[in-house]
């Protein structure tokens, strides 16, 4: 430390001498380069002032005492800058630490999502989820029971970032601790609602859509808890309709009941479930219209379900200048023809 | 052990007296101008904290000496003592970026950086004692 300080001192003296002798831009450029070295060696501003004064005093032993004192004054003022700089460095280090912690948490969160999609004869399933920042407040879940019925869940925690992510992990465990026997969508949401109401802070809300597809009868039963409506594509009429389920957001009241809806799914029909990050895509002109999403799905309909969700995501991301404002989750289930 | 000199801090004049006493002693001990200014700034911050949050207290300054393997080392010890409200959450005030006065003051983390050793004892409702040392190199 002492050595490197001495070396810097000598370098500074030499550069200063050159500059005073020639007074050219080259000299100033050297000074600018030197400042990087000073920062690297964590020389504080007050030390620089003192170093400068020492050199000047060495060169001009009879500088006016007023000038000399002015440097003492400057030195005093510079101490504050030195402290602010050190604090800035330490806050920068802490930010790095926090970011790497969040990276670890985000990786952990990825493992909460189902590792693989269930395979069912005659059904094509695609899903994509993308957090707006590192951690997500969206959640989806698949489950296949012994009758090959597929349960699909999509949930959105109001808010985003770390608090939403913490809440999401609770939803995952709540869903997994529900009774083993297959629950009807309405009953499942009632159970979850109780868990959320008892365990989550009253200012956090969760919306959810849960559906169960029975491949033996090709029926889709579903219920919703204040969740963004999805879409249902009717292959026969070649039209999209809203897939809406009335129900209270989870966690608002202890006793809530959820109406159950039913669709008979014909070959080629498509069920689209999504989070509000999909419908609330914002471009410079404002929110996008639902038709934008349905027409994107339509344009990619010849592809597999997974390819459709990926294409829709890419197009919507592009529309927003590759900046997501909210967590995005899109799920597509198609009965194959 | 040398004699401690204590300055009562109750007004901004007290802050200035504490600074002056610290600077004089730092000079006597043999600190260079940069360290003199650092010690003085640390005293200033401690005294301001007393003035702002505890209404009154005292700053005591003494020259100290300690024997270590390189021989005797000299230093200056500054103790700030008050019977104010105390600090409820010491960890919080010791973390960077924390500020109660909203100003750009160095705060306690700044004092810790300016000095070599730093020790704080605070009991809520009873007061605060901060002891800090700078060694002469």
Image (spheres, helix red, strand yellow):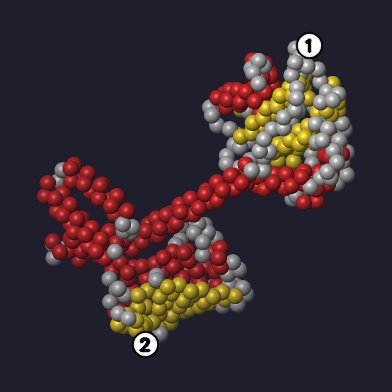
Residue at image coords 58%, 25%: A314
Location of mark 1 (residue): A237
Say which chain tag 1 marks. Answer: A
Q: Residues within 10 Å of mark 2 (few under 14, many from 20)?
A: few
Give the answer, above or below, for where A57 lies relative to A20.
below
Location of mark 2 (residue): B2
Of residues A189 and A44, which is closer to you in this image?
A189
Left or right? Give the position of A128 relative to B92. Answer: right
Which image quadrant is residue B133 in?
bottom left
Say which chain tag 2 marks. Answer: B
Q: CA distance from mark 2 to mark 1?
A: 98 Å
Residue at image coords 71%, 36%: A140
Element type at marker 2? loop
Of residues A108 and A254, which is closer to you in this image?
A108
Q: Residues within 10 Å of mark 1 (few under 14, many from 20)?
A: few
Give the answer, above or below, for where A91 lies relative to A106.
below
Estimate the x, y position of residue A337 in percent, counting from the top left: 75, 16
Q: On the same chain: label 2 and label 1?
A: no
Estimate the x, y position of residue A311 in percent, counting from the top left: 60, 23
Of residues B118 and B69, which is closer to you in this image?
B69
Estimate the x, y position of residue A173 in percent, counting from the top left: 74, 47
């Amino acid at each position: 430390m002492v050595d490197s300080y001495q070396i810097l001192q000598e370098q500074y003296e030499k550069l200063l001498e050159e500059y005073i002798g020639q007074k050219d831009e080259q000299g100033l450029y050297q000074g600018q380069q030197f400042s990087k070295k000073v920062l690297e060696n964590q020389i504080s501003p007050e030390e620089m002032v003192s170093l400068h004064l020492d050199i000047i005093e060495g060169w001009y032993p009879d500088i006016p005492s007023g000038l000399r004192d002015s440097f003492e004054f400057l030195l005093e003022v510079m101490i504050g800058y030195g402290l602010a700089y050190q604090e800035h460095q330490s806050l920068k280090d802490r930010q790095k630490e926090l970011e790497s912690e969040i990276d670890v948490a985000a990786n952990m969160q990825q493992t909460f999502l189902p590792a693989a999609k269930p395979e069912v004869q005659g059904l094509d399933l695609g899903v994509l989820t993308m957090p707006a920042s590192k951690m997500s407040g969206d959640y989806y879940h698949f489950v296949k029971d012994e009758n090959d019925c597929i349960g699909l869940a999509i949930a959105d925690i109001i808010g985003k970032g770390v608090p939403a992510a913490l809440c999401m992990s609770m939803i995952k465990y709540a869903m997994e601790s529900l009774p083993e026997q297959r629950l009807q969508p309405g009953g499942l949401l009632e159970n979850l609602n109780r868990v959320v109401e008892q365990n989550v802070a009253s200012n956090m809300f969760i919306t959810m859509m849960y559906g169960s597809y029975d491949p033996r009868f090709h029926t889709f039963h579903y219920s919703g808890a204040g969740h963004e409506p999805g879409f249902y594509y009717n292959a026969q009429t070649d039209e999209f309709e809203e897939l809406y389920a009335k129900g209270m957001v989870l966690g608002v009241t202890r006793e809530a009941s959820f109406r159950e809806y039913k669709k008979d799914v014909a070959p080629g029909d498509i069920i689209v479930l999504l989070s509000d990050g999909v419908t609330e895509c914002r471009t410079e002109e404002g929110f996008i219209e639902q038709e934008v999403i349905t027409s994107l799905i339509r344009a990619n309909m010849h592809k597999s379900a997974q390819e459709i969700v990926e294409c829709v995501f890419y197009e919507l991301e592009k529309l927003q200048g590759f900046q997501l404002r909210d967590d995005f989750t899109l799920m597509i289930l198609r009965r194959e023809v | 052990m040398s004699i401690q000199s204590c300055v009562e801090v109750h007004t901004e004049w007290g802050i200035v007296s504490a600074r002056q006493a610290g600077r004089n002693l730092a000079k006597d001990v043999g600190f260079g101008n940069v360290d003199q200014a650092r010690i003085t700034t640390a005293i200033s911050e401690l005294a301001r904290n007393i003035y702002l949050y505890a209404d009154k207290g005292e700053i005591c300054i003494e020259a100290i000496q300690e024997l270590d393997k390189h021989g005797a080392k000299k230093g200056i010890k500054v103790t700030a003592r008050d019977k104010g409200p105390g600090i409820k959450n010491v960890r919080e005030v010791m973390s960077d970026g924390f500020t109660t006065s909203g100003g750009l003051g160095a705060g306690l983390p700044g004092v810790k950086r300016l000095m070599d050793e730093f020790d704080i004892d605070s009991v809520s409702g009873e007061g605060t004692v901060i002891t800090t040392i700078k060694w002469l190199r």
